[in-house]
Amino acid sequence: MEIFGIRQRTGNQAVSGLSALIILIGLTMLCSCAHIGSPSDSRTDNDDTERLSTQGMITLALASYREAVEYGDSLMAIASENPSDTKAAIYGRIIIGQACIFIPERATECYPALSEAEQLAIQAGDNEALVSVYNGLGLYTLNRGMDPAGALFYLFKGLDIAKKYGFSNLHALLLTNIAVSYYLRNDPVGLHYA
């Protein structure tokens, strides 16, 4: 069974309505009331990078993965045209890496995109992007590797950075994903993070 991109792997158990609600709340906390335009709208200046990265992340949170990839691809095109636009390069990879987790025919793109985003975010000192990368690596490990323990490694890494820099929305999202990871391990410790 798969709910919001999280696969339950223990027998016939279904993710409870409460768990689904917790996931939905975490995703909702990422979203703002921003207008979501077309990814192919103009893509030539810094305003476009900001708009496309914000809209791509919102679209990703809304589980519109194929549309999110379009935003990621547009950001990568900006980064290709303007190599000094590190935000476009970082967020293009984050969005593509996270969206492709849930697009089977593009699943092989996940880890390389997220790993490259991690290196770029570290080099640029972009801690907020780094938190998103670790959340993505956690989701990748959880969904593609079916490894809740491995996912917790990345999620806690992101949580430490989110706490340190006060990224409250990402903090809440990571706590939700940590709770889900523990749930998939059948470990009640995760209730402390919900």
Image (cartoon, helix red, strand yellow):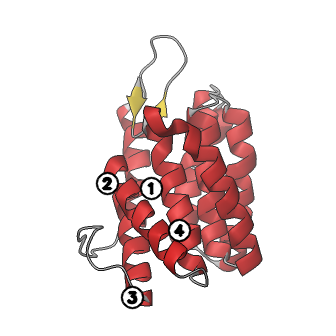
Q: Residue at x 44, y 62 (%)?
A: 72
Q: Residue at x 43, y 46 (%)?
A: 23
Residues under numbered marks 2 and 3 in contact, where contact means CB atoms less than 8 Å apart? no
Q: Quadrant of residue 181?
A: top right
Q: Can you tell which mark lies on residue 67?
A: 2
| Three-letter amino acid code at the position of disc 4 | Tyr
Label 1 crowding class (10 Å Cα cut-off): few <14, some 14-19, many 20+? many
Label 3 crowding class (10 Å Cα cut-off): few <14, some 14-19, many 20+? few
Among numbered discs 4 and 2, the one appearing first in the sequence: 2
Q: Residue at x 48, y 39 (%)?
A: 106
Q: Residues under labels 3 and 1: Cα distance?
A: 27 Å
Placement of 8 over or under 47, stated as above or below? above
Name the secondary structure under disc 1.
helix
| Apparent side of residue 88 relative to residue 37 in the rendered image (left or right) | right
Residues under numbered marks 2 and 1 in contact, where contact means CB atoms less than 8 Å apart? no
Placement of 20 over or under 71, stated as above or below? above
Q: Quadrant of residue 73?
A: bottom left
Q: Residues under labels 4 and 2: Cα distance?
A: 15 Å
User: Could you tell me if residue 139 is visible in this image?
Assistant: no
Say which residue label 1 marks. Answer: 26
Quadrant where the N terminus sits is top left
Q: Can you tell which mark lies on residue 188?
A: none
- The spot of residue 13 in percent (x, y) is 46, 17
Among numbered discs 1 and 4, the one appearing first in the sequence: 1
Among numbered discs 3 and 4, the one appearing first in the sequence: 3
Q: Can you tell which mark lies on residue 91?
A: 4
Name the secondary structure under disc 2.
helix
